[in-house]
């Protein structure tokens, strides 16, 4: 007889959410005054995305948001994290807001509140207005100032009814995939520019947080979502430990250093000295970036395994962030990346829930007293409807069970994790991979745009309703 399994239960106030982002789901790219963002330009450039796919239609959430919110309510979601398309609100990236653009988000927020779902807004999820890129993009300081203006506009419009705010999503991707390896928009491959971009994204976060607070009720929460890497050395040899330290600085310290502690790591300056002199860090910038935060968002998918490049074990640049002959790791040419052993998702990312536990415990130590949210976690699988039209995704259920159990372990170990946002609510445009990779708990038929909750959505709904994880075999 098998042992009864103790159910994994969560604190009653734990927030059960799902997340998306504007360019990945909205479509309607030419409606109501919206102008192109860097992702419109990039995805329309031949060879940049799988099959030349774009977010022109995406999953048409702009027109179907009411049904989508009703579906979220059916799935028992307590919170929904979405992003605002900057070029819908401020088409040139500067100047007065377009009310029609803001109105869409007002309607969406009202619909969510009417269904008792807490909205959580991300201001920037990678879709810079193209005009700002033409004026220099994130490597240019002015982009940070423009972001603060945009933050103030959105905060003033929605701060009365949205309590949870996130300035930036995964600034690492914006800086290093956008300006370093070039696999993301705007597709530049300039190591120096990628570090400048990182600094100006940090500045945008700080100025944006301050701007939000200047127009919003004090009860609102301001946070940032970092895709902090869990960097593991291949061995305990000094050279491998140094390689891990290097990548940790470039993945994590470069953002959390100034945001949480008001300083870049000294070791980051040393490692990147051949690439940049950091002279664009002006007096007062670090204080401006180091704003008090109400929470920290952590996005986690898989750990990163590294060694010194001359290690006897074969490694390469395959760091899971797309193919490019340019590195997204400036100043780290002597670091090799390795595939972590174990089962993988459709992205080729190794499944390792211990990484999520480690990440949460790290930030529990790094930022004591700061509430944490897992603002993204999930997996892509090659989901297909069965002949009855149902979509069974037991692998995703196992993935979610493993990672949510890791979150629960971290809470038991003293971490203040207040909520979890599954990535993603529904299948969507997975950037350079186009529509090929399905991260959704809800299946989208791209021919008809019909939505079908997968078995993982039903499983997650049960977890959200009961505050306890159902067994992995439930809802199949
Ligand atoms: O789809 C992305 C999302 O936009 C940002 N975080 C990672 C997800 C999966 O790649």
Image: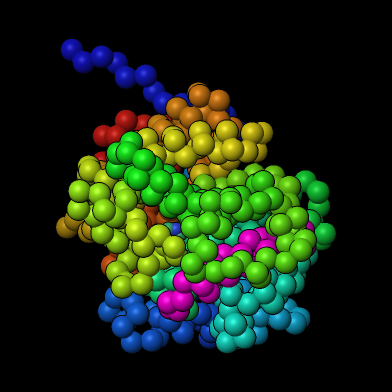
Let me know if residue 388 is in the magenta part: no
- Where does residue 270 sit, x and y in percent of width and height? 53, 56
Q: Quadrant of ligand 1?
A: bottom left
- Where does residue 111 sit, x and y in percent of width and height? 61, 59
Q: Is residue 420 left or right of residue 339?
A: right
Residue at 73% x, 62% y is: 285
Above or below, 169 relative to 399: below
- The total of numbered circles placed on residues is 0
Residue 431 in view: no
Above or below, 325 relative to 368: below
Q: Nearer the viewer, residue 187 or 246?
A: 246
Residue at 52% x, 47% y is: 298
Let me know if residue 189 is in the magenta part: yes
- Where does residue 212 sit, x and y in percent of width and height? 75, 60
* Quadrant of image for the N terminus: top left
Magenta-highlighted stretch: main secondary structure? helix
What's the magenta region? 187-212
* Quadrant of image for the C terminus: top left
Residue at 58% x, 55% y is: 255
Q: Is residue 340 left or right of residue 163?
A: left
- Where does residue 122 sit, x and y in percent of width and height? 60, 60
Q: Is residue 346 left or right of residue 215?
A: left
Q: Nearer the viewer, residue 394 or 75?
A: 394
Residue 304 in view: yes
Residue at 76% x, 67% y is: 152
């Amino acid at each position: 007889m098998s042992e009864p399994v103790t159910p994994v239960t969560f604190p009653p106030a734990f927030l059960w959410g799902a997340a998306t982002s504007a360019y990945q789901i909205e479509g309607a790219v030419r409606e109501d005054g919206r102008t192109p963002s860097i992702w419109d330009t990039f995805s329309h450039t031949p060879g940049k995305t799988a099959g030349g796919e774009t977010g022109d239609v995406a999953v048409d959430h702009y027109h179907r948001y009411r049904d989508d919110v009703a579906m979220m309510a059916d799935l028992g979601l307590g919170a929904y994290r979405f992003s605002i398309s900057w070029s819908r609100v401020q088409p040139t990236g500067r100047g007065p807001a377009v009310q029609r653009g803001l109105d869409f988000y007002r309607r969406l927020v009202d619909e969510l509140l009417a269904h008792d779902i807490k909205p959580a807004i991300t201001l920037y999820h990678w879709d810079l207005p193209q005009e700002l890129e033409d004026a220099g993009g994130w490597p240019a300081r002015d982009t940070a100032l423009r972001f603060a203006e945009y933050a103030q506009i959105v905060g003033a419009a929605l701060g009365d009814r949205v309590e949870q705010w996130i300035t930036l999503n995964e600034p690492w991707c914006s800086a290093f995939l956008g300006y370093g390896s070039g696999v993301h928009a705007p597709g530049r491959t300039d190591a120096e520019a990628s570090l400048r971009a990182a600094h100006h994204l940090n500045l945008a976060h700080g100025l944006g947080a301050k701007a939000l607070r200047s127009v919003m009720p004090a009860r609102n929460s301001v946070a940032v979502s970092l895709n902090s890497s869990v960097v593991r050395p291949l061995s305990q040899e000094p050279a491998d430990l140094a390689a891990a330290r290097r990548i940790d600085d470039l993945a994590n310290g470069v953002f959390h250093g100034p945001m949480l502690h008001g300083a870049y790591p000294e070791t980051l300056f040393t490692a990147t000295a051949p690439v940049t002199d950091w002279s664009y860090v002006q007096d007062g910038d670090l204080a401006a970036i180091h704003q008090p935060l109400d929470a920290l968002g952590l996005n986690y998918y898989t750990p990163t395994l590294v060694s010194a490049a001359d290690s006897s074990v074969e490694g390469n640049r395959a760091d899971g962030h797309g193919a490019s002959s340019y590195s997204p790791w400036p100043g780290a040419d002597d670091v090799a990346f390795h595939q972590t052993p174990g089962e993988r998702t459709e992205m080729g990312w190794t499944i390792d829930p211990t990484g999520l536990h480690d990440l949460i415990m790290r930030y529990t130590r790094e930022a004591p007293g700061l509430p944490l949210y897992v603002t993204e976690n999930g997996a892509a699988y090659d989901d297909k409807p069965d002949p009855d039209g149902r979509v069974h995704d037991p692998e995703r259920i196992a993935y979610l069970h493993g990672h949510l159990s890791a979150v629960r372990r971290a809470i038991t170990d003293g971490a203040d994790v207040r909520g979890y946002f599954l990535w993603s609510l529904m299948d969507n445009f997975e950037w350079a991979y186009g529509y090929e990779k399905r991260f959704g708990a809800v299946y989208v038929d791209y021919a008809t745009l019909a939505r079908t909750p997968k078995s993982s959505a039903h499983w997650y709904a049960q977890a959200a309703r009961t505050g306890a994880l159902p067994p992995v075999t439930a809802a199949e």
